[in-house]
Amino acid sequence: MKILSLAIQNKLLLAILAGVASIVSFQVWQYNQAQYEKLISEAKNGCGVYIELGEDAIKRSPSLRALKYQNKRLSGLEQPGINSESADPGAYVMLFRSPASTLPPNALPFDDPFFTSLLNKEESPKTLMVQAVSFDLVKKQATVKSLCTKKPFVVALEDLYLEYQPIDRDLRRSDFDILF
């Protein structure tokens, strides 16, 4: 009888512990889910801001506008590591020619429809402001990071441009006919 009573008590204790463990694990899962949703929300906002900054850079720059919308590459258009004096970490405009996606295929976006849509090819992809982390001038590549991706990714130097193009000062004073 004593053994039976002890076995019942142990099973009851195990059942209570299992219930408590499942409640605690559910609360931990709920907390982690809320943190992930918060991370995605903040990343969406940040990514949207960097897309707006990239699009604003295009609107302000006649030379970048001509490149994006008319596929005209003007001489004097400065790119880091190619024909600009600087190839320093910092903010650059990442501009792919159409048709392309906003993010390159090697980028790892967050698992959310908003971010994965940035991998879809579009006739006129969105322009994104990115932060260059490092440059490999031999391979003509840069490692950049973006709030639209989980990790930094590699992009060709030919797709990075200075936000403020020195050629634009000269274009504004001339009668050059490009998308003003």
Image (tube, rainbow, N blue to C red):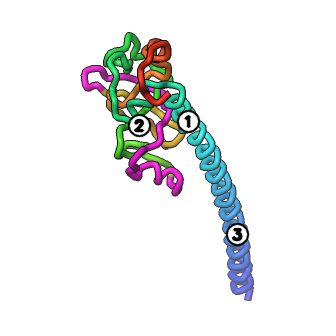
Label 1 sits on what residue type? Tyr
Q: Nearer the viewer, residue 56 or 142?
A: 56
> Mark 3, residues whose alpha carbon is within 10 Å: few (<14), some, or many (≥20)?
few
The magenta span reads: 111-140
Q: Between disc 3 and disc 1, whose residue precedes?
A: 3
**Image-based side of 19 in relation to 178, left or right:** right
Instruction: Report the residue marked by disc 1.
Output: 50
Element at label 2: helix
Q: Which residue is mark 2?
A: 69
Query: Is-magenta flag for residue 117?
Result: yes
Judge whether residue 60 is colored magenta. Answer: no
Task: Look at the picture and state if 11 lies above or below 66.
Answer: below
Disc 3 marks a residue whose amino acid type is Leu
| Residue 166: quarter of image | top left
Tell me the amino acid under the disc marked 2.
Tyr
Q: Earlier in the sequence, mark 1 or mark 2?
A: 1
Q: Which residue is mark 3?
A: 17
| Residue positioned 56% across, 36% down in the render | 50
The picture places residue 31, in percent across and down from the top left corner, at 69, 55
Q: In front: mark 1 or mark 2? A: 2
**Whether residue 133 can be seen here:** no
Whether residues under marks 1 and 2 lie with C-beta atoms below 8 angstroms apart, the answer is: no
Q: Quadrant of the N terminus?
A: bottom right
Q: Judge from the rendering whether residue 4 lies leftward or rightward of residue 79; answer left or right.
A: right
Question: Which mark, residue 174?
Answer: none
Q: Is the residue marked by circle 1 packed among few (<14), some (14-19), or many (20+) residues within 10 Å?
A: many
Secondary structure category for the residue under label 1? helix
Front position among marks 3 and 2? 2
Between the residue at mark 3 and the residue at mark 1, the CA separation in whole angstroms equals 49 Å
Name the residue located 59 percent from the left edge and 44 percent from the top edge: 43
